[in-house]
Amino acid sequence: MSSIKLISATLIAVAFSIVCTAYAAAGVAEGKRIFDGKKCGSCHQSTGPAKEKTIKDQFAKKGPELWYAGSKFKPGFIEAWLKSPKSIRPLQYNSITKKNAADHAKLSGSEATDVAAYLMSLTSADVKPSGIKAGDNPKGKRVFITKMGCYGCHQLSSKGSVVGGLSGPTFVGVSSRLNVDWVYAYLVNPQVFKPVRDMPNYVGLIDKQDMADLASYVAGLE
């Protein structure tokens, strides 16, 4: 390739990168505008760190916090979910008795794309690359079932059926929803994300290797 062609190709690549970056930034800005305009913040906290100081503060929340959504969720999940919302919690947020009405607002294609871009831009420095691979981890499964009894609060698929408790978010389909690094970060230091109602808090009950195995198993659940 001649030097002129090489320079031209480089300039085109740089220009394309600049356009893509500007487009992404525009999507984030528009997503924030939509998020604010629809008053999504009345249910979801989008600025960190966690603000709750007491259990009363926690129970006052109407929906899960999103200030670390970009660290928690896998790319593509939020956009798909906003276009076709499906209950992740069998029971209402902060309730152990009331069934989830599954009435979350649905967004149009472009709105879902932009709001997802905004939410995925919200990350936590406490979620770092862990090197953990999500998958069928037998040691993690043993921690989940035998050591900690996580199925008492969380549903999962087992032999073609959905089993487990209802008080926590379902673990059915986690592999397409949650980032394994976030699952691990949550297990290691839950108070960063839930300073008051920090369930589950396994710190001191299982070691970090158990937490890594558990994160691997949970994040690999189909």
Image (cartoon, rainbow, N blue to C red):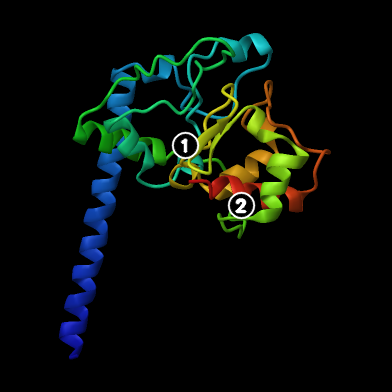
Q: Name the mark nearer the viewer: 1 or 2.
A: 2
Q: Which residue is mark 2?
A: 216
- Report if residue 188 is visible in the image: no
Residue 107 position (above or below residue 178): above
| Disc marking residue 206 | none
Residue 200's quadrant in the figure? top right
Quadrant location of residue 6?
bottom left
Q: Nearer the viewer, residue 156 or 44?
A: 156
Amino acid type, label 1: Ala
- Pick whichever, 159 or 124, lies toward us: 159
Instruction: Name the residue located 43 percent from the left edge and 46 percent from the top edge.
Output: 176
Residue found at x 68% / y 50%: 140
Q: Is residue 159 left or right of residue 84?
A: right
Secondary element at tag 2? helix
| Residue at 56% from the left image edge and 49% from the top image edge | 180
**Residue 118 appears at what percent x and percent y?**
35, 36
Instruction: Tell me the residue that label 1 is attached to.
Output: 69
